[in-house]
Amino acid sequence: MKTHRLALIPGDGIGVDVTDAAMAVVEAAARNHGFSVQATRFDWSCAHFVQTGAMMPEGGIETLRGFDAIYLGAVGWPDTVPDAVSLHGLLLPIRKAFNQYANIRPHRLLPGVEGPLKSSGFDILCIRENTEGEYSGAGGRVHQGMSNEVAVETAIFTRAGVERILRFAFDQARVRRGHVTSVTKSNAQKYSMVFWDEVTREVAADYPDVTMQLMHIDAMAAKMVMAPETLDVVVASNLFGDILTDLGAAIQGGLGFAASANICPDGTGPSMFEPVHGSAPDIAGRGIANPIAAIWSAAMMLDHLGETTASKAVMAAIEAVTAKGIGTAPGRHSTDQITTAILTALEKPA
Ligand code: NAI
Ligand code: MG
C-alpha cells in the first residue's frame, strides 16, 4: 500500500480547526481508496514565536524537505506577532525554499452556494507567481522615524521566473478550456510589466492551441465581477495574484470556499496546500470556521500526490453537501457539522 508522508502545520486560530477537518477527510479518503497517510504535526505558529522567538526552529526548512507534501492551516496572530514577522518567518520562506513558484487558486461556485453575482457559470483557475515580483523582500528603510525617512521596496522579475509561471499557466489551459489571460499593469509600470507582456507573447507562440489575452489589473478586477464566465486560466504576478484571488474568493461565496496549492512543478521539493483564508482571530475558538476551503485544498493535495480518484471523491462529497445547503451560509453550521456531513457523503456517494 502506498504511504504519503505529510507535514502538517496547523498554525494559529481557525487554522488548527480546519486542518483537523481536512485531515479527517484525507484519512477517510485513504481508507476508501487503498493508500495510507503518515502525518507529522509541527506546532510552528505565532504561539511558537512567543515561546521561542522564531516562527519555526532553525533547520525547519530542511525538516520539511523530506515530506511528500506540506499541509498548512493558517498562520497569524497580530495581537502578539506583527503579520509581517509571521508571514516572512514561515510561509514565504517555505514557498521560496521549495521553489513553489506556482500558486493555484480555483474560483467557481459550488452547488447550493449563492455568490454575490448574477452569474453562476464561472470556473476560473488563478495562477499566481509565488516566489518573486513584488514580494521578493528586496528593499530597506533609512532614517527610520525621522522626517527624512525613506522606504524602498523593489519588485524583482527574472526571465526564468516569469517564463516558468507563464508556461505553467499555458499548460493548465491545455487541460482546461484553452484560454489564458495574463494580467499586468504595463501601461504604468513600463519596465517590469512591459517585460512580463513580452515574455507572455513569446511563450504564447509555443502554444498555438491556446488563445491568449493581455489585460491590465484594474480592468481585470472589473471583468471578474462583470463577466467572470469569460475567463479560464488567469496568470499574474505575486501581488496582483494575491489581490485578484481575494476577489475570486468573494465571487465564489467567501473565504470559506477559497482553496489553494503552492506547487513546486519540477518536484525538487514538497508542494504545500492551504486554504486562502487566514487564522480569523475574530471567530477563532468558536467552532464555526467553514472547513470547505481547507478540505478542497486537501483534495488538490490528493490530486497532486497521484490519488486522483480519491481527490474526485472528496470534491464530489463537498458538492453533495453544499447542494443540500450545508456549509453554504456563514455560521449556520458548525465546523464539525460540515466536516461530518462531508465524511458521511464520502462513505455513501450519491
Ligand atoms: P482572515 O482570512 O483570517 O479573515 C478575514 C475574514 O474572513 C474574517 O472576518 C474571518 O472571520 C472570515 N473568515 C476567514 N476564513 C473563514 C472561514 N474558513 N470560515 C468562516 N469565516 C472565515 O484574514 P485577516 O483577518 O486579514 O487575517 C487574520 C490573520 O491571518 C492575520 O494574522 C493574517 O496575517 C493571517 N493570514 C494568514 C494567511 C495564511 O496563513 N496563508 C492568509 C491570510 C491572512
Ligand atoms: Mg492573500
Image (cartoon, rainbow, N blue to C red):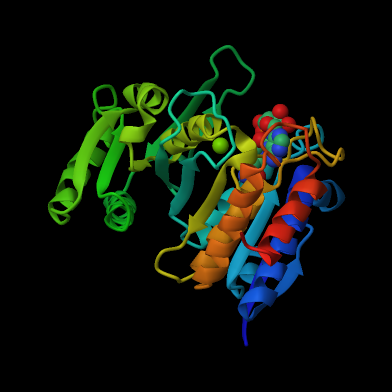
> Does 202 sit left or right of 105 as displayed?
left
Residue plotted at (47% across, 50% down)? 103
User: Of 146 and 284, which appears nearest the observer?
Assistant: 284
Residue 331 picture location, percent across and down: 77, 32
Whether residue 54 is visible here, answered yes or no, is no
Is 119 placed left or right of 62 in the picture? left
Place residue 141 in its image quadrant. top right
Residue found at x 43% / y 28%: 119
The answer to whether residue 346 is seen in the rendering is yes
Write the residue at 57% across / 56% down: 315
Residue 201: percent from the left, percent from the top?
Answer: 16, 44
Q: Is residue 117 above or below residue 167?
A: above
Q: In this view of the protein, which residue sits in the foreground, 327 or 61?
A: 327
Q: Dividing the image into four equal quarters, which quarter contains ligand 2?
A: top right
Query: Residue 91: x, y in percent?
Result: 61, 50
Q: Quadrant of the N terminus?
A: bottom right
The residue nearer to you, when weighing 153 against 87, is 87
Q: How many marks?
A: 0
Q: Position of residue 138 (x, y in %)?
A: 47, 40
